[in-house]
Image (cartoon, grey):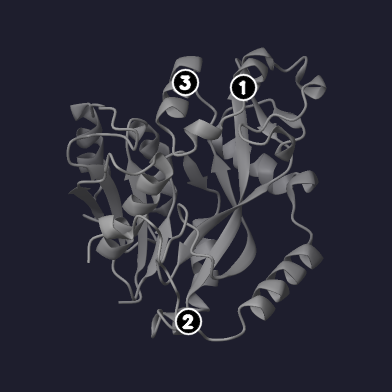
Amino acid sequence: MKKIQVGFLMSYDYDLLKKSIPPVYNLADNIYLALDHKKRTWSGNNFEVDSSFYDWLKTFDTENKIIIYEDDFYVSEISTIENDTRERHLLALKMGIGNWLIQVDSDEIFIDFEKFVNRLRKYDSYLINPERHPIQFAGFHINVYKYLDEGLLYINQPTKLILATNYPNYHCAKNTRERIVYNEDFILHEGLARTEQELKLKLANWGHKQDVNTSFLEKWKRADKDNYKTIKNVFYLEPEIWKELGYFPSKSLSELKKMVENDASLKIPKMKLFFRNFGQWFKHSKIMKPNYTPKFKKYFKK
């Protein structure tokens, strides 16, 4: 127990795992890839996995850490976001309660996984009785908006995301609604950094597909390095959440990491982190057993 367990959801964008697995490989005890046994998305659409991907896994996994976990991850009676939450719950159970349960997506790339793991280890006491001491850890996305010929557009304000928990009583996707510890851990998020065809496929099979705003795709198609400063409110759900775009003149991952680390506009003020963490500690100061009763709980395995 007390292992660093990392889980990915393996779906139609599985090829992105070639970029997201390597940064976590050395420090992870195990890496789980959750794959629907009939290769269906949360919307029930089918996809295929090219055999070359399995060849890559076999070659890359020199320490035999990677485990493909196949199960029935699609239930037609529930929504896409509920299927999302259910799959994450089953994956967490497979990884094992009593360990650090880290879940990231195939399009999320850790910039400094070692720093994140070192911070987690300071809370190892929370793994002794996780049901009575539930806690989750959050970092921040650097959201890649669009790849261009000689660089990329990104959202110039980091957005928070949940990265890990000790007790997977998920309510919506990875959020357990328990105490959150925020740190300046950055994840390069390539959620929208795709071709137009790939992006349309993602939106058609995504857990929030019913909520995508109608102006999003038109703005995304129009944006380039010459006009990005004039394009505002670009988030795919509530547009004003992402107010402005920035531009990096490179697509090299190593160079992008350095740019992110040195860009003052992407830093999180220390006082902001302090007050967020104090507020979370104060809000969840009473030790209570989690009350988790989602309406789709009957589809969760015991």
The location of residue 199, given as percent across then percent down, is 48, 23
Check contact, mark 3 vs mark 1: CB within 8 A: no
Label 3 sits on residue: 200
Task: Tell me the residue at 25%/35% (across/down).
Answer: 56
Estimate the spatial distance between the alpha carbons at disc 3 and disc 1, rounded to whole Å.
13 Å
Question: Quadrant location of residue 46?
Answer: top left
Instruction: Give the camera-side residue of 248 and 167.
Output: 167
Specify the amino acid type for callout 3.
Lys
With 213 as the anchor, is 207 left or right in this view? left
Which is more N-terminal, label 1 or label 2? 2
Task: Tell me the residue at 46%/38% (across/down).
Answer: 107
Residue 72: mark in rendering? none
Label 1 sits on residue: 214
Which is more N-terminal, label 2 or label 3? 2
Mark 1 surroundings: few (<14), some (14-19) or many (≥20) residues within 10 A: few
Mark 3 surroundings: few (<14), some (14-19) or many (≥20) residues within 10 A: some
Check contact, mark 3 vs mark 2: CB within 8 A: no
Instruction: Locate the C terminus and report the quarter of the image it occupies.
Output: bottom left
Helix, strand or loop at mark 3: helix
Which is more N-terminal, label 1 or label 3? 3
Task: Tell me the residue at 41%/71% (across/down).
Answer: 167
Task: Tell me the residue at 43%/44% (across/down).
Answer: 81
Label 2 sits on residue: 133
Does 29 sit above or below residue 238?
A: below
Question: Quadrant location of residue 97?
Answer: bottom left
Does 203 sit above or below residue 218?
A: below
The location of residue 102, given as percent across then percent down, is 42, 60
Specify the amino acid type for callout 2.
His
Does 246 sit above or below residue 98?
A: above
Instruction: Give the camera-side residue of 1 and 36.
Output: 36
